[in-house]
Image (spheres, grey):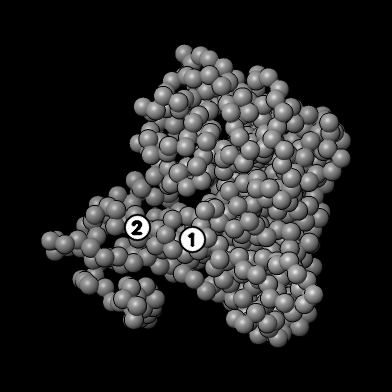
Amino acid sequence: MPALDSHLLPHLIRCSADRDPAAPALRDGARSLTYGELATQVEAVANGLLSLGLGRAERVGIYLDKRLETVVASFAAPAAGGVFVPINPILKAEQVGFILRDCDVRVLITTRDRWVTLQPVLAQCPSLRQVVLVDPPAEAGGAAGTVGTSVSSGPDRAWVRYADLLDAPARPAHRVIDTDMVAILYTSGSTGRPKGVVLSHRNMVAGAKSVASYLGNRADDRLLAALPLSFDAGFSQLTTAFHSGASVTLLNYLMPRDVLKALERDRITGLTAVPPLYIQLTQLEWPAAINEHLRYFANTGGRMPRETLGLLRQRLPSAQPFLMYGLTEAFRSTYLPPEEVDRRPDSIGKAIPNAEILVLREDGTPCAPDEPGELVHRGALVGMGYWNDAEKTAERYKLLPAGTPGREAGLQLPEYAVFSGDTVRMDAEGFLYFIGRRDEMIKTSGYRVSPTEVEEILYATQLVGECVAFGVDHASLGQAIQVIATPPAGRDALDTQALLAACRARMPAYMMPAGVHARSGPLPRNPNGKIDRKLLSTEWIAALESDAKS
């Protein structure tokens, strides 16, 4: 039965398929799907997952690069009544294993090569029951729900063929409503391991409708999915397109020039990317044809440098720039309309449709115009907290006090909002300006990196005694990761090259330190007895500036 309106995530595809089943939906190199074909495959894979015994709200991990199967699986898991967990394909085995364990993934969809690299960690994932391979060995046999080659020594964990999921018999899906969870997106926290942000169907569908409304997405749009689909902004390219009936080109690019080629080849009308990629793109020659069809470009994952914005507008005089701010915990928060870019290029804009952005003091009262305060997001896009982490959830998701705008004293039921940890100010006209972060997160290459997670990996190498990681401003990366470390006990010198080699084996590229600086120990402590990261980073930056002047 076709959905009358999209209130669950898979409805975005179903509604567009009902309107025009022959319309193009997805392109992956030489492969493509119409909306009718995409809807059919989503339903088929949902039946396949149910045949594997997927229960309501059980998690389906998707560890793939951008390809048709990634998209189908991401919508099929919730169509079955489950929850999808997109895993960034550049993560290493240990980080993938942490995600699989943290949210008790039941089914993992991946490739044969990735499955092989995960063997050392799969034995530590007791909840994992099935692995689905999109490219199994040629000798594979069996059908969906049957046992193929054992994933590990556990007899009840096996791989099955993705193709067999498409042939599974129809089964009734688990009943879910729009406030049920649909996805867990992992994002780095300011301390320790990544946190799983839980999003509901309502969060994602409301976000798709909101973003599509201000970007003006329509059925003849062609969007380029250049960002990882494990990012909220990356996955948003799918949801906004599917809500509008537009098509999406999936791109796994190696070089920035590949992005330009895709823009020209597929006559892309909408591009969303992070500032580091835009910085790289502005250093290249752009085919003139791109300006003829690119209708808008939008940024996410950090502030767009003015120089980069200026160069993009020179190359794309016909395209509208959308400067956006968001956080995974609430999907997307603000945007600056194109007509305001010249007047206030440093602004992050105003609240997106169907959201309210407040600037609050520490006591919860609203700030006066231009008074710095914390950015607080309320509304339908506020997520469901961090998976299985009450302490961190309480730090970020808080009750709005009575008297806050929208919270009249007579209201009895509480409302949670996302307290971003970002300091902003709002001018008299309601435009917001970013001032800084309250925590020590490092923004690099469009990623949020926890300094503590970097330090944990450094300690695991056993090649350091003490260490501290911090971010410093960088023209193209946003911030570069710098490390100060002492030699391990019993050694007189720090083996920097060995340490960097060990990091490359354990870290994705975006987490790699730009520099490692040896220092004799012990490192200075703050009054709480912790290594004083702020002091060390301040001293390092001061020394760098002093060297530049001499």
The x and y percentages for residue 51 are 61, 24
Q: With respect to residue 180, does 42 lie above or below? A: above
Is residue 534 depicted above or below 265 in this figure?
below
User: Could you tell me if residue 445 is visible in this image?
Assistant: no
Query: Which of the pair 538/392 is nearer the observer?
Result: 392
Q: Residue at x 59, y 81 (%)?
A: 362
Q: Residue at x 38, y 58 (%)?
A: 454
Secondary structure under badge 1? loop
Judged from the image, the secondary structure of the residue bearing numbered disc 2 is helix
Q: Residues within 10 Å of mark 1 (few under 14, many from 20)?
A: many
Q: In the rendered view of the protein, which quadrant contains the C terminus?
A: bottom left
Res. 456 mark: 2
Assign the N terminus to one quadrant of the image.
top right
Instruction: Tell me where residue 113 sits by quadrant.
Output: top left
Position of residue 104 in the picture relative to residue 153 (left or right): right
- The residue tagged 1 is 189
Q: Which mark is residue 171?
A: none
On screen, residue 336 versus residue 518, left or right, reads: right
Q: Nearer the viewer, residue 305 or 173?
A: 173
Residue type beneath disc 2: Glu
Marks 2 and 1 sit apart, C-alpha to C-alpha, by 13 Å
**Type of amino acid under label 1:** Gly
